Amino acid sequence: MTKKAFTLSVFILIQFLHPITAFAQKTLADCEKAEHATAQQSRCLDAVKDVLDRELQTWVNHHVFNLEEKALVTGRYSALKMFKRSQSNFITFRDNDCRWQYLAISPEKGAGIAYKKCYVSVTQSRINELESVK
């Protein structure tokens, strides 16, 4: 195993073993049950977003590592380049998809909450997709 591969393996392992905060166990459904809807729900969703962002990055790192290893063996880097492009496009899509939902709602009526719910939902879908690819 090369030094780069070992370092990346350790990094990925640390990501999986990273101590999870109290909010890490929360889900979108848990946040919707918050008593003081706006402030408490917003903080809850922020915590869920943070956890999902870390999980998403772990899966992205996993696939990049695997694709780099395959590219070193085969000399073909097209899948790695396309994966990186797809991830960049996903980030743009997620931002735009959630932003239009935010803009369609008045800030007083929970636009921020709508954005965060969208962000959580779309990010979780991407994680599920990346988990299913072997």
Image (cartoon, rainbow, N blue to C red):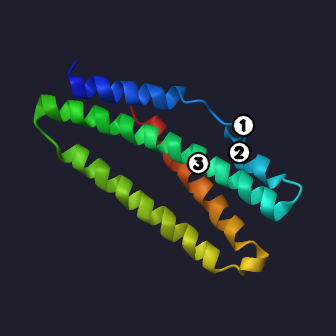
Most foreground residue, 47 or 106: 47
Specify which label sits upstream in the sequence, 2 or 1: 1
Q: Can you tell which quarter of the image residue 74 is in?
A: top left
Name the residue rendered at 44%, 25% in the picture: 13
Labelled disc at residue 27: 2
Residue type, numbered disc 1: Ala
- CA distance separating discs 2 and 1: 12 Å
As helix, strand or loop, the secondary structure at mark 2 comes to loop
Rendered location of residue 81, percent (x, y): 23, 49
The residue at which mark 1 appears reads as 22
The x, y position of residue 12, in whole percent, is: 41, 30
What type is the residue that disc 2 sits on?
A: Thr
Distance Cα–Cα, label 3 vs label 1: 12 Å
Mark 3 or mark 2, earlier in chain:
2
Relative side of 80 to 124, left or right:
left
Q: Position of residue 88 (x, y in %)?
A: 36, 58
